[in-house]
Image: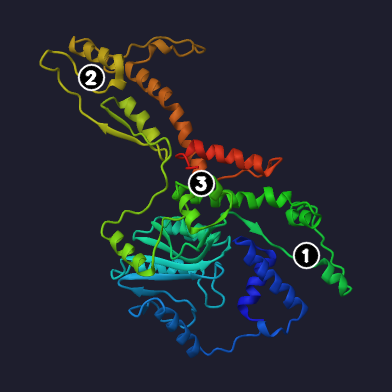
Amino acid sequence: MNRKTQYLLQSLSAGKFYMSRSVADAYMFSLIETLKNPDLKGFLDDSETPEQKEQAALRFIASYSQDAQPYIADKWYRYPPFVVQGVLVIPVNGVITQDSYWGETSTKNIMSWYEKAKNDPEIVGVLEVGNSPGGAVFGTRELATYKASYPKPKVTLVEGLCASAYMYISAPADKILATSASAILGSIGVMTTYASFKKYYESMGIEVKDVYSIGSPQKNYAYREAEKGNFKPLEEGVLFQLDNQFTNFVKAYRPGLSKRATLGADMTAEDAMKEGLLDDIATFDEAIQLVKSLANSYQPKVKSKTKMSKQFVIITSNKALLASARALQSFKGSNISIEEIEEEENDDNGNPPITNQSEGAGASASNQQQQAGKPTASNAAPTPTPTPANAQPDASAQTPEEKIAAAVATALAPLQAKIVALEAHSNLQVNASTPPIQNNQQMNTSAKSDDEMFTPIAQ
């Protein structure tokens, strides 16, 4: 059995995949046939020489453009990256895995090629071309997150299938294109496929016993329950958490995504454009030209904005107010802008200035006291007064600055709570300790929460 088949079959028998079900079924069939006949010809190690592999890779590159040049000098890769008119072309073909075990692209390879191109002044942008059913969970999110902040244009061109994990890593692209109306996109979601060898071992007279420590009753619990026919621990546990991460990420970078698309539907290019998964139909040459045109004035694509997009501007000389505002400004995403100004003299009519409406009557009264030559609470000489040990602070004894600071803190308290909620949402934390009674119940709740936090999703 060659390394490619061995790795895929081992992964499919125990791993979690962002993958098209039909492809998973095909590999599971291969697993069964291999178990029945380990010497099956189709699984023998290939006998291609390094020179033959290199020639095959060069033919692959030339099939796109006679002007294409290899980007790396490595005979290992079956589908190596290449350059056309200053655009790096990264092929994404076959099952996506975290590491490359047989010369096909992996998430680590793809990320390293992006990184090399980022620091290469001759590369103006990146075009991913591919046909992939998706692949492994591990490595997919890391690559998608890396691409989201990439400083050069990035476009995806689907040549056949863009499903599951391939849809995940394509989401942050500036544009997603397809070469044909027959292209298929979608399959957003998570699945796991595992094989039960119980009957196989029994046929050979082998009885397998699993024994767990009393200190780890939850170890492999979901799979043990699945062996008994109870799939809820899998469906409502880790799989659902991974599904939430996947769906929320794609929604953040494809704000026009429909509800049908988030539920895992597969669709042809025509429907995919209506459902928010695809931007247009284009040829390879058109896609190259698009990347070049985007490079002229490129701004990286960002997540769709939340409803709390207004900026709070505070312009003041009040020290207590500045302290309160700066404390709130430290929250991530607080959208508070602060500008400190100097105290101004009276205007032409002799009236003291009011620097900010948020300072209100307290600041105005303080300024009037200063103009009348009377000491204010901030500059008056303190007079010691005996205070009982059990006396409570008198709110009326607060200085105008303290009253303003307290009022600002009270007014902005809901903002703090909103920021904390948004940060928690951006981390995509899912509490799996209390799974829902029905999957649809939690899916509906999650969708409602997303609609409240993000801009409305086109239906």
Q: Please, what is the three-letter code of the amino acid marked with disc 2?
A: Ile
Q: Is residue 341 left or right of residue 234?
A: left
Contact, mark 3 vs mark 2 (Cβ under 8 Å) = no
Label 3 or label 2, whichever lies nearer to me, is 3
In the displayed orientation, state which residue is furthest to the right.
205
Q: Please, what is the three-letter code of the amino acid marked with disc 3?
A: Ser
In-front residue for pair 314/330: 314
* Disc 3 residue crowd, few under 14, some 14–19, many 20+, Cα 10 Å: some
Q: Please, what is the three-letter code of the amino acid marked with disc 1?
A: Ser
Residue at image point 87% right, 75% down: 204
Residue at image point 47% right, 76% down: 79
Distance CA(mark 3)–CA(mark 1) = 37 Å
The residue at which mark 1 appears reads as 196
Residue 154 seen by the camera: yes
The residue at which mark 3 appears reads as 258
Q: Is residue 431 left or right of residue 301?
A: right
The residue at which mark 2 appears reads as 354
Q: What is the secondary structure assignment of the residue under circle 2? A: loop
Distance CA(mark 3)–CA(mark 2) = 50 Å
* Disc 1 residue crowd, few under 14, some 14–19, many 20+, Cα 10 Å: few
Label 3 or label 1, whichever lies nearer to me, is 3
